[in-house]
Amino acid sequence: MKPTYLMTRKERREAQNRQNTREQQTNPATDSTPTTPAPEPAADTKPPVSAAKIAANQANALHSTGPKSDAGKRASSHNAVKTALTGQTILLPTDDVASYQNLGREFVARHQPVGFEEESLVQCLIDTEWRLLRIPSQESSILAVGRHLLADTVPDHLLEAEVYLKYERSLKNLHIHENRLRRYRATDLKSLQTLQTARQEREMLLKKAQQMNQAKQQPSQPQPQQEDQQPAVGFVFETAEQPLKMAV
C-alpha cells in the first residue's frame, strides 16, 4: 500500500472509505445512533365556537364594509392623503375645481401644445403649479393652528417662535416639497420648449419644401417685349435733330 503523501485525492478518499467500512464491520454498535422520538403535537385546547357566536360575527361584519355611496367612497379614498403634494392625488375634496380648470386653460393658451407629448408636459406643468399654489395656504394653516393652541400658554412676544419650534418639521417638509416641485416644473418646461422648437423647425422646412414644389409645378410665362425697347447688347447711337436754316 502506497504512503498517504504519495496518493492522489481519489486514492485517499477510497482508502478512507475502506477504513470506515472495516471499522463498521468490526464494531457495528458504534454505528448505531440513538433516535429521539418526535414530540407529539400539542392538543388543541381552544373551546369550540358556538353557532350563536358565529352568527353574531357575521352580523357585525355586515356593518363594517365601508361607505356605500359614491360621495362616501370618494371621501374615504383620501383618508391617507395629508398634503396632496406627492402621489397621484391632485385635487383634494376641499379644492376649487373651477379654479383648477381655469389654470389649465391658461396654461394651454400660453403654451399651445400639439401632439400627445406636448399635451402631457403641459398637463404636468398644470398639476405642478396647482400643488405649488397649495403650499402657502397649508403653511398658513399650520401656523394658525399653532397660534390657536399655544395662545394661552406662551407670552405674545414668544408665540411665533414657539409655534415654529413646535411645527418645525412640518414646515421644513413643505419647503422640501416646494423645492422639489420647482425643479420638476423647470425640467418639464425645458423639455416642452425643446419639443416645440424642434416641431416649429420641421414645420418651417416643410412649408419651404411645399412652396418650392408649387413653384416648380407652375408653367413659366414669357414676358411681353415692348416695341420701343432697345436691344440688350451692343451700342446705341443717338443723333440730335438739327433745325434747318433758310438761306437769305
Image (spheres, helix red, strand yellow):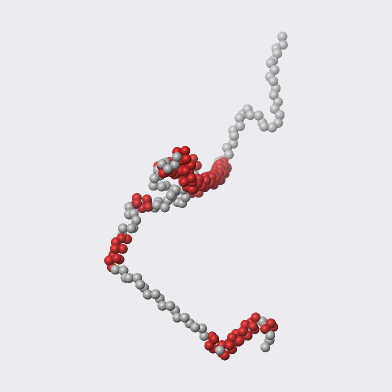
- Residue positioned most to the left: 52
In which quadrant is the N terminus drawn? bottom right
Task: Report x, y in % for residue 34.
Answer: 49, 83
Task: Report x, y in % for residue 231.
Answer: 66, 31
**Between 200 and 171, which is closer to the camera in this rendering?**
171
Q: Can residue 124 be seen in this view?
A: no
Examine the image and state in which quarter residue 244 appears: top right
Residue 65 vs residue 130: left or right? Answer: left
What's the residue at 70%, 12% (across, down)? Answer: 246
Q: Is residue 240 visible?
A: yes
Residue 207 vs residue 231: left or right? Answer: left
Task: Report x, y in % for residue 67.
Answer: 34, 54
**Between 55 and 206, which is closer to the camera in this rendering?**
55
What's the residue at 54%, 85% (across, down)? Answer: 31
**Between 125 and 4, which is closer to the camera in this rendering?**
4
| Above or below: residue 144 compared with residue 62 | above
Task: Report x, y in % for residue 56.
Answer: 29, 63
In which quadrant is the C terminus drawn? top right
Residue 32 vs residue 148: left or right? Answer: right
**Between 76 and 55, which is closer to the camera in this rendering?**
55
What's the residue at 63%, 27% (across, down)? Answer: 228
- Residue positioned most to the top: 248
